[in-house]
Amino acid sequence: MSQQAVNGVSHRGKVLTLDSMNPNVKRVEYAVRGPIVQRAVQIEKELKEGVKKPFTEVIKANIGDAHAMGQKPITFLRQVLALCSYPELLEDNMFPEDAKKRARRILESCGGHSIGAYSASQGIECIRQDVARYIERRDGGIPSSPDNIYLSTGASDAIVTMLKLLVCGEGRSRTGVMISIPQYPLYSAALADLGAVQISYYLDEDKCWSLDVAELRRALNAARQHCNPRVLCIINPGNPTGQVQSRQCIEDVIRFAKEEHLFLMADEVYQDNVYAEGCKFHSFKKVLFEMGPEYSSTVEMASFHSTSKCYMGECGFRGGYMEVINMDPEVKAQLTKLVSVRLCPPVPGQALLDLVVNPPQPDEPSYTTFMKERTAVLAALAEKARLTEETFNTVPGITCNPVQGAMYTFPRITLPQKAIDKAKEEGQVPDMYYCMRLLEEEGICLVPGSGFGQREGTFHFRLVH
Amino acid sequence: MSQQAVNGVSHRGKVLTLDSMNPNVKRVEYAVRGPIVQRAVQIEKELKEGVKKPFTEVIKANIGDAHAMGQKPITFLRQVLALCSYPELLEDNMFPEDAKKRARRILESCGGHSIGAYSASQGIECIRQDVARYIERRDGGIPSSPDNIYLSTGASDAIVTMLKLLVCGEGRSRTGVMISIPQYPLYSAALADLGAVQISYYLDEDKCWSLDVAELRRALNAARQHCNPRVLCIINPGNPTGQVQSRQCIEDVIRFAKEEHLFLMADEVYQDNVYAEGCKFHSFKKVLFEMGPEYSSTVEMASFHSTSKCYMGECGFRGGYMEVINMDPEVKAQLTKLVSVRLCPPVPGQALLDLVVNPPQPDEPSYTTFMKERTAVLAALAEKARLTEETFNTVPGITCNPVQGAMYTFPRITLPQKAIDKAKEEGQVPDMYYCMRLLEEEGICLVPGSGFGQREGTFHFRLVH
Ligand SMILES: Cc1ncc(COP(=O)(O)O)c(C=O)c1O
Ligand SMILES: Cc1ncc(COP(=O)(O)O)c(C=O)c1O
C-alpha cells in the first residue's frame, strides 16, 4: 500500500517518477515553448560554439515578445520605473516632472514607500483606482469599481486563477470550459492541469477566423453529453488567428452566454493591437452594458488585460489585471483569499500597469515623446502585419487571412502528400515536421499549428510579427 | 443534469456561487491576510476619516515585510535595478562602476537587451549560473548545476509548483505531505487547494520549537492508515517559530526521509536570518552531501530561497529560486514544461536575485557601503529579536522561547478561563479573540496562533520584528 511496501526496501526507485507524479501535469501541453523552441536554443548554442549552419542566427518568431524582437521600451514607462526603483533619482533633474509625479504617487501608496514591500494581494489600491478609471474612459463612461479589479502576475496568472475558481464536480458533472480552436495554449494547459473538460469550438478560417454562434451551440450541445459546461472563453483580438470580433458578434456571444448560463472569460490583452481598416476593438464589458440591464446585471464575466502586448510589450514585468462583473460577493471573498496565498503580484509590474492606464496627458511634459513612441510602435506592427500577409499570399502552398489585430499570422500550409508521409514515418505531426525543417534549414523558429489546435487534416504555423 | 435543467430557465441564479465553485479553494485558509488584517485595513480607513480610537495608527506586525516596517532598501540593489529599468542611466556618472557592470551583464542576457522581454521559463541562464555558484560558495564547494536551478515568482511560487508536481492518487493512495505545526500557512493552503492530505507533525515548544524524529515517525505511521505519505516539508529557520535546526537534527531528518522514502522540501528563505549565539544555518543540501554518496545520490530534494527576507527584504519584487537534487530527468522535463505555461518569473525579480547571489566584492567600489548596510540591517533584526523575547518574558501570562532566527516571535499566551468562555460565546477561537481585542484597543495587528496551527488547548500569536 505504501510506497515502501510496493517497492521493497532494498532497491527502491525514486519517490517522484513519471509514473508517480501528478497525472494532470503530464497531460499539460505547451507548444509555444515546446520541442521546437528547445531545439532553437540548442542550435543557438551550436552556432556560438562554431558549428556550421546554412544561417548565422536563429530568428525566433515563436513568441509574442516585442522587446526580444527589437522593439524599444517606451521612455516614460522606464523613467518612472527607474525612479520607483531608486528614489534618490527624484532629486536628479534629468527626469521630467510628470514622471516624478507618477513615481511619487506610486511610492506613497507602497508600504514604507518602497516597491520592495508586499502590496495588498488584490493589488495596490490607487493603481486599482487608476485601472477602473481607465476602463471607464475606454468604455465611454460605463462605471467600473476598483473593488472589482484584481491585479495579477501577467494575464496568465489571472486567467489560471479564474479557471481554478470555476472548476468543480466529478465525472459527468465535471466543469466544461469552451475554448476556441485555434487557441492560445495557456487555456488547454490550464484545463489539463485543473482536470477540467476542454470543449473546443472552431473559428471559421473561411470567414477570416470569425466566431459563429451556431458553432458554439454545436460544441456546447455535444459537450452536455459528458460534462457540465459552465464557462466560455473568448480571445479578442485573437491569438494565434489575429481576428477582431465585430460588435454584432460580441452581442451574439453575450446573448448565447446568458441563454446557456455560462460564465464569460474575455481575454482582451491585444485591445490596442487593431490594424485592419473597418475593424475596431469593442470590449465585452461595453457591449454587455449597452445591451441593457437584462444583460448587464446578470451575465457573469471576467475580462483580462496585460502589460505584455499592445504598444508597451513589457512582458518581463509580468503586469496585468482582471475585472470581474456580476460576481457573487461570497465568491469574490473566496477569490480574494485565494490570491492572498501567493501574497501579491510583482510590484514593479503593478507600477508599470499604473502607467499604462494613466499615461502622460496632453498638458504634461512627456506627452509628445510618449505619443510619438506609441504611434511609431503601433504603426510598425500594423505595417508588419500587412507585409506578412501580402508576402505569404504570394508563396505557393500558403494561404493567409487578413491580419486584423494582435501580433500574429496563422497561415495555412498545403503540404505535399510526400511530406505528410515522411513526417508520419518519423512519428511527427506533419506541421511540426515542417517547422522543424524550417528551423534546421533556414534558422527560423515558428510554432506549428498543432500547438494551437486546427481542424483535422489542415496544417498551419504561427508567425509573430 | 446541466445547470440549466437544474435551475429552470426563468429564475436562474448565478453560474458561480459558493455552492458551485471549486470546493478545494473553499477549504483554503490563509490567516496572515485573514480577518484580522482586513479589520486592520478598515480601522486605518476609519482613522483617516477622523473616527476616534485609543490610538492614532495601526502597527501592522502581521507579515514579514521589512520595507513596510521601515527598513530601507540596500543601495546597490536598487541602483542596478534602476540601471536595468532605464539603461540610459548607464551614461550617467552618478552610478558606481560595479553597479553598471552588473546591469550590463543582466541586460546582455535579456532578449533584445531589455528586462521587458520574457526570459526562459526556468529563468535567465546567466542568473541561474550565478545562483549555482552562490550555492557552491555557501556549501563549501559542493557542486551545484544551473540546470537544477529554477527561478520563481517568490519562493511561494516554487513551493506551490513543487507540491503540485508531487500530488497524485485518490482515496487512501492520495499523496500525504508532512508539514510542521506551527507552519507557514502557504503550506496548508497549497495542500487544500491541491486536495492533498496534510500530515501534521508538531514542533516541541518545550525544547525551543525543535524538531524530533520520533514525532515525525509518529505522524507518519498514523498517516499511513489513510494516505500515501511521500513528502516531508521543513522550514529552517522556522516561521513562525524562529528556531534554527542543529546539524544533528538535519542529519536525522535526512536519514528519516531516506528510510521512509520521502521527497524532502527544505524551505530556507531565512538562511541569512540567524541571530542566537551557538546557532548556525546549515543547508539541507550541504548536510546531505556530507553524509556521503549513499545519501547524496539518492535522497530527492528541493530547496527554496527568496529575495523577500534576510537583509534584502525585497518582497515586492517576487524573486526566488529552487534547487532540485536527484530529480528524475523525465520529471524535470515535466517541471520545465509546467513552469513554461506561465511564461516566466518577473525579470526585475530575477535581476534582484542575481545581485543577492552575486553581491559587491571587496575590490569593488560598492563593497563598503553594501556591507555597512547589510550588517546594520541584520544587527537591527537581531536586536529586535532579543528585545522582543526579553520584553515578552516579563509580561505575566506570556512565555516566549529564545528567538534563534527568522523574523518572528511566537509567544504562548495563558488566557484566563473567562476570556476563553467569552470568545466561545462570540463564536471565535480564543486567540483570534485576543488578537482582535488587541487590534481594537491598542491598534496592534498580530496573527493568532490558530492561523499557523498549535497544540490543542495552547494559544499563541505571531509577532513580526
Ligand atoms: C491571448 C493571450 N492571453 C494571455 C497571454 C498571457 O500574457 P501575459 O501573462 O504575459 O500577460 C498571452 C500571451 O501571449 C496571450 O497571447
Ligand atoms: C517560510 C516561508 N516560506 C516562503 C515564504 C514566501 O515568501 P516569498 O513568496 O515572498 O518569497 C515566506 C514568506 O513569508 C515564508 O515565511
Image (cartoon, coloured by chain):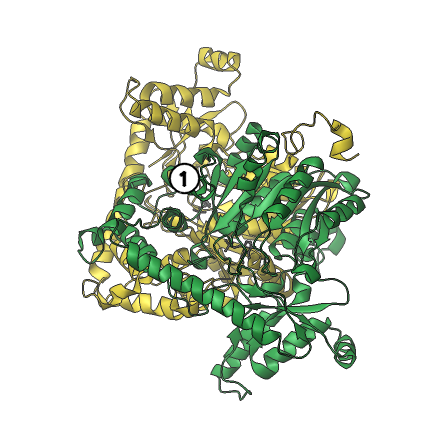
Chain colours: A yellow, B green
Q: Using the image, determine if residue A420 lies above or below residue A112.
A: above
Q: Can residue B29 be seen in the rendering of this structure?
A: yes
Q: Which residue is mark 1?
A: B133
Of A348 and B280, nearer the camera is: B280
- Residue at position x 60%, y 55% from top? B186
B187 to the left or right of A397:
right
Q: Can residue A197 be seen in the rendering of this structure?
A: no
Q: Using the image, determine if residue B287 lies above or below residue A436.
A: below
* Rendered image quadrant of residue B367: bottom left
SS at badge 1: helix
Of A184 and A215, nearer the camera is: A184
B331 to the left or right of A229:
left
- Locate residue A123, reporting x and y percent: 47, 62
The quadrant in which the C terminus of chain A is found is top left
Of B8 and B244, nearer the camera is: B244
- Locate residue A102, reporting x and y percent: 31, 66
Q: Using the image, determine if residue B324 lies above or below residue A353.
A: above
- Residue at position x 47%, y 63% from top? A119
